[in-house]
Every structure is written in structure tokens, then in C-alpha cells.
């Protein structure tokens, strides 16, 4: 039987360097590159996005781990040191988003930038990072779906040997849900690239589009997994989630659940889709033409404050120039 890929890439003396960490680091660097590249269009210096990544990544990891551990507390309460063993896996993307959003929004405010405008720029970076990061789950043989036949992986999905072999866990082959989500995220990334060049796209809508696109895929793929965070909920909510997922049952069996009757990520995904759609509609109706477009200039309020109060000489009698629309964007978030 072919051996699975090792989790440890190499060792530096007593320190083991895990593939999981290397993959997450690569995801962060590629996300940084995408943000810097798009930021140049708005004349935002690369150092700003480097600071964002230095704050956002640790905050995301902490948030992701706290979120996961909170839902798995029974597994950790008697082994508190395992809480820090993040290289073993066990992080939740929605927790990562919460952590990153909190940290980056505070930093943007300190720098005088509208958080939502910066979030628009970073939306493709987020989905690209998730697309790459899922391969860390592949190395760790986690976040997979239910059992499948080897022939399904080879003859139906036409997967290469290294993926098929890694999906063999203790003699049983499993759905490569990491791959499904990675490919879905690639599709969402391409859509975001296309959307951000549309002249009708308003500020905040690319970030909202990221949540919609990612959450749609996550909802359906989550139903295949066997390691979902879950809870015991009312029968009506369970029926609703099962009903929304039912088209998948034409081709797949849902993954088994160790506990609970409702998958947390599916509920969160549905709520995020509804919230993002509502956010777009609300802002368009409330602010109309006053809402800046995605392509409009991005100006830091700190830079506006630092500029001379009036460009013309005091003796000219001319009034100071009107405040630029982009300096008021926080009012439209």
C-alpha cells in the first residue's frame, strides 16, 4: 500500500517544520501579493498591506483556533496544552474571518482608511488564501468527507495517485472535500477578478460577493464532511438545512456526524449569504448615487487632515475645496 505524505517537511535540530505551516505561510504571501498589486491601482503603498497581513494573519489564526476549540471544548478541557497544537489541524475559517476583521478594521481606522474599501481590495486575497490553505488539510488527512470507493476517485474524478493515496486513511478511501472546496474557491476568485473591473460595482460589494460566493460552496461541501462542528437544534432548522442541501443527494450521501443534528458552518453560511445580499440592497437603496464605486479613489482621512486647510492663498478670498467623497466613506459602511 502506498505511503501517505508525511506531515513534517523537514527538521531544524529539535524543531519540526510542518507542511501545514508552510502551506498556510504560502497562502498568506500570495494573498499579500494580490492585495499589493491591486493596491497600486489606488496608490496605496505596499507597506500598508504588509502591516495588514502582519496583524491579520495572527489574529485570524487565534480567532480560528478559539472558534474551533469553543465548539470542541470537551476534547480540550482536560488537555489544555493541545489547544496550542495548531499544526495538528483544527481551525475554523469563520473564526479566522472574525479575528482578521476585528484586527484589520481597527488598523484601518487608525490609518484613516475606510475598512470596507480595504476589505474590497483584500477579498480576492482571502479566497486565494483559503484555496491554497485547504491543501494543508490534505497533508493532515483531515476535513475529508465520507467513505467512497477507490474507483470513484480514480475513474469518476480522475484524480492523480498522490491525492488518491492521501485519501486512503487506515485502509478506507474518503471524499477529498478539501479539493472540492479548493476548486470552488478558485472559481470564486476568478469571479471576483471579473467583478472588480465592472464599472457598476459599488464599494463594499466585492467583499459582500466574497462572502456570498464562498458561503454557497461551503454550505454544500460541508454536508459531505464527517468532522463538522455541530449542535443540537430545533427540528424546523434541521429540516430547513436538509431541504436546502437535498439537491446534493441526487449524487452524494451526506457525511456522518459524531454529535449534534445541525452543522454549524451550514447555518453560518446561510446567514452570511442572506446578510451579504441584504447589505448590498440596503446600501444601494439608502445611499444611491452617493455611494462610491469600487473604482473610485481611496483617500485616507488622515491624509486629508494633514493637507493644508486651503490650497489657495489666504488673501484670495476663495473658499477651501469641498471634502472629497472618498473621505466620507465610513458613513456609508
Image (cartoon, rainbow, N blue to C red):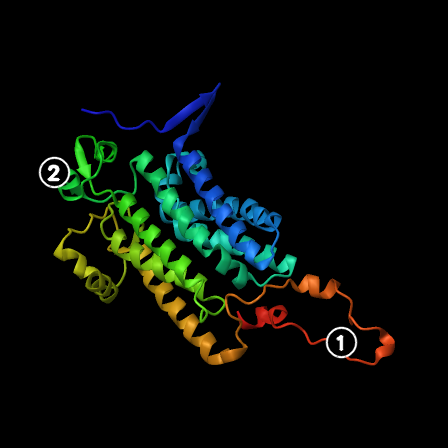
Task: Give the number of the mark in front: 1 or 2.
Answer: 1
142 left or right, relative to 159:
right
- Residue at 49% x, 80% y is 286
Q: Which mark is residue 151?
A: 2
Q: Residue 152 in the image: state x and y as whole percent.
A: 13, 41
247 left or right, relative to 57:
left
- Residue at 77% x, 79% y is 319
Label 2 Cα crowd, 10 Å radius (few <14 / some 14-19 / many 20+)? few
Identify whether 48 is placed above or below 200.
above
Q: Which mark is residue 320?
A: 1
Q: Residue 192 in the image: state x and y as whole percent.
A: 40, 59
Identify whether 214 is placed above or below 321.
above
Identify whether 96 is placed above or below 294.
above
Front residue of 291/258: it is: 291
State which quadrant residue 43 falls in.
bottom right
- Residue at 24% x, 53% y is 223
Amino acid at each position: 500500500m502506498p505511503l501517505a505524505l508525511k506531515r513534517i517537511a523537514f527538521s531544524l535540530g529539535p524543531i519540526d517544520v510542518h507542511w501545514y505551516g508552510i502551506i498556510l505561510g504560502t497562502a498568506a504571501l500570495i494573498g499579500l501579493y494580490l492585495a499589493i498589486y491591486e493596491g497600486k491601482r489606488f496608490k496605496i503603498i505596499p507597506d500598508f498591506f504588509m502591516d495588514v497581513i502582519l496583524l491579520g494573519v495572527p489574529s485570524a489564526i487565534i480567532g480560528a483556533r478559539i472558534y474551533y476549540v469553543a465548539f470542541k471544548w470537551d476534547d480540550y478541557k482536560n488537555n489544555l496544552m493541545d489547544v496550542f497544537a495548531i499544526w495538528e489541524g483544527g481551525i475554523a475559517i469563520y473564526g479566522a474571518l472574525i479575528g482578521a476583521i476585528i484586527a484589520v478594521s481597527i488598523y484601518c481606522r487608525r490609518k484613516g482608511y475606510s475598512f470596507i474599501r480595504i476589505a474590497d481590495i483584500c477579498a480576492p486575497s482571502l479566497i486565494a488564501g483559503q484555496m491554497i490553505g485547504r491543501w494543508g488539510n490534505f497533508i493532515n488527512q483531515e476535513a475529508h468527507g465520507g467513505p467512497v470507493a477507490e474507483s470513484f476517485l480514480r475513474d469518476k474524478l480522475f484524480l492523480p495517485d498522490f491525492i488518491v493515496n492521501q485519501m486512503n486513511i487506515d485502509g478506507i478511501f474518503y471524499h477529498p472535500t478539501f479539493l472540492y472546496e479548493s476548486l470552488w474557491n478558485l472559481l470564486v476568485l476568478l469571479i471576483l477578478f471579473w467583478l472588480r473591473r465592472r464599472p457598476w460595482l459599488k464599494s463594499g460589494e466585492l467583499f459582500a460577493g466574497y462572502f456570498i460566493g464562498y458561503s454557497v460552496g461551503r454550505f454544500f461541501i460541508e454536508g459531505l464532511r464527517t468532522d463538522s462542528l455541530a449542535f443540537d437544534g430545533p427540528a424546523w432548522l434541521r429540516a430547513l438545512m436538509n431541504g436546502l442541501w437535498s439537491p446534493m443527494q441526487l449524487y452524494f450521501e451526506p457525511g456522518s456526524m459524531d454529535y449534534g443534528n445541525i452543522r454549524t458552518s451550514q447555518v453560518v453560511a446561510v446567514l452570511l449569504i442572506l446578510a451579504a445580499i441584504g447589505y448590498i440592497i440596503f446600501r444601494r437603496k439608502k445611499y444611491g448615487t452617493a455611494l462610491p464605486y469600487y473604482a473610485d479613489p481611496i483617500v485616507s482621512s488622515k491624509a486629508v487632515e494633514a493637507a493644508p486647510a486651503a490650497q489657495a492663498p489666504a488673501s484670495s478670498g476663495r473658499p477651501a475645496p469641498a471634502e472629497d467623497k472618498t473621505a466620507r466613506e465610513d458613513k456609508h459602511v
